[in-house]
Amino acid sequence: MASTLAPVSSSRVTTRPTVELRGVRRSFGDLVAVDDLSLTLEQGQITVLLGPNGAGKTTIVRVITGALPADRGTVTVFGLDPCGADGEAVRGRTGVVPARPALYDRLDGRRNLRYAAELFGVADDEIDDRVAEAAARFGIADALGQRVGGYSTGMKARLALARAVLHDPELLLLDEPTAGLDPESVRAVLGLIDEMAEGGKAVLMCTHLLMEAEGLADDIVVIDHGRTLVAGSPAELTRQYWTSPSVLIDATDRLALDQVADLTYVRSYERNGAAIVELDEAEHVADVVDELVRAGVRILRVEPHTPTLEELYFAIRRGAE
Amino acid sequence: MSRSSRSRAWVIARADLAQLRQSRDFWMPMLVLAAMFFVVIPGLLLLLLTSISNVETAEQLGQVVDTIGGEVSESAEAASTEPGTQAAYALAVYLVAPLAIIIPLTVSTAVGSNTIIGERERGTGEFLAHSPATEREIFFGKLIASLLPGYLTAIIGFALYSLVVNVIVGSKIGRWFFPTPTWWAFFVCVLPPFIALGLAIILNISARVSSAAAAQQASSLVTLPLILIAYSITGGALSTTAWASVILGALGWVIAIFALRKGVSAVRRERLLGLGS
């Protein structure tokens, strides 16, 4: 399926896109990593790139920074070509958290941060303050004097994040930023992503962990085999892929809820704790409740069900197949 | 290179040198090797030769120096009438010193061969690939980080070697004689461009190969020609005039600059990412 959809703008959107990919293709020998992909990232917007391992997420990050040239298509970042003479300017305004932290294990945390600050052109008289600020923000201030080789996975991930934001980038690209992190660190990372977007930065987060994208994404792009399956805001995708009304029903005897699965107007039924019932029409909610009451089931809760990102993702994948 | 480019190359070089300082497992063996070649081995040999009191052994040594002939015999005989001292002089100027050239070369090539492929193997190439540093800046940063340890080893090593030689043999001759004019010309004119040339080739290889081991194997071949040149110049096989060293050095710089240009083009971001070799 050729990608024709670009992420739809959200409430935070301003004018010119920060990143614009049009019909991008990149292959490695016979392997096509990205194929005819179009993507737009806007200022102040969090775009979540969802896809299984090997879907092409890392290649997209690399194409955006100009680290890898596209075989075909156009790539524009801040209105510039990252693979041409403007590459230096593009990369200087971009922060990247790679899938592997890519830290210098023999150096201590402070030296790693200083190296990045100097390379990205932070003024000499600001470096110490920026390093201290970034380290404090990610809770690694006490470990700055230690060799990075002795850091835990979580500390390395935090250091990589601190390094990515040291130079106050306008575009932040995060490739699986929470992989291997403890819950506290995950929360810190997601907090940072939200904070960056609030501050007007464009953020692209690649992940295959749907839970962490939940509630964070302004736009979602689902890719597989380097192609866009679908793109849009969560609300739009929900409307598009979740056309039938759903209700969540809970009861004292949850097993008894299963009897509604066979009703003619029930399109799908799933019980994992409470039951999620998908109906062909919203007016049948009353009929379902009536059936259960007549069967003597004591209902605790009936409420509209908004699909989780995970449910949405699998619905999209099913649609693609 | 612009000022900001020079500055970024220097930033990369400083980070590499900082890592090198932390790599005790790398520089400790190098330090031992340097101490052996510049101080311990020449010191012991020269002490042994200059303290020979047996007349028969001394005469045999004198015959050996005569047998070598050419410039070696002439300068050794001009330096002293004592056969042991003559042998010590010949050994210090014509045998051990050219061999010691291998140390700064080994240091530089060991650093250089690992520098670009090392970024790739450790995964830190991804950081550099996404940084604003240009391929040229990355190359020159790596070059500086490889050159400095080699030049520093050459300066300190030969300073120590000169001290050992002059204290042990010079005291017998009655004057400090090392470095000789030929060696001065070699240090100033020939050694720097040929180390740079060797490193340009090694960095080129380091940017292209898929493992550090492959880069190290290839780099060992690069050191061989320089050792041969050192022996040829100091042994008199090549012209020993200062002008000859100046011309050879200039030629070395021309080839080195060409090799450096080729080296720059070998650094590509996708290679830093571990793609394509």
Image (tube, rainbow, N blue to C red):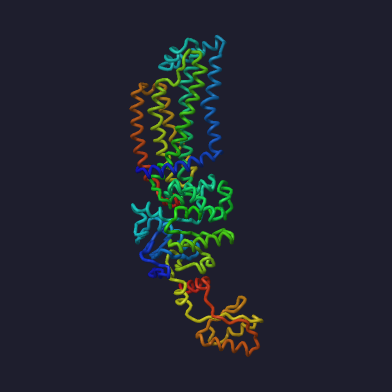
Res A167 seen here: yes
* Image side of residue A23 versus residue A297, left or right: left
Q: Nearest the camera: A248 or B31?
A: A248
Residue drawn at the location 54% of the way across and 56% of the way down: A138
Q: Position of residue A305 (x, y in %)?
A: 54, 78
The quadrant in which the N terminus of chain B is found is: top left
Q: Residue furthest bottom?
A: A294
Q: Nearest the camera: A137 or B261?
A: A137
Res B277 seen here: no
Classify B249 as above or below A217: above
Task: Count numbered badges in the picture.
Answer: 0
Q: Nearest the camera: A79 or A292?
A: A79
* Image side of residue A216 versus residue B183, left or right: right
Residue drawn at the location 46% of the way across and 45% of the way down: B117
Q: Position of residue B253 (x, y in %)?
A: 35, 33
Classify A56 as above or below B25: below
Q: Nearest the camera: B58 or A154?
A: A154
Tell me which corner region of the image, top left, top right, bottom left or bottom right, holds residue B147. Answer: top left
Residue drawn at the location 48% of the way across and 65% of the way down: A51
Q: Position of residue A114 (x, y in %)?
A: 48, 47
Q: Position of residue B252 (x, y in %)?
A: 36, 32
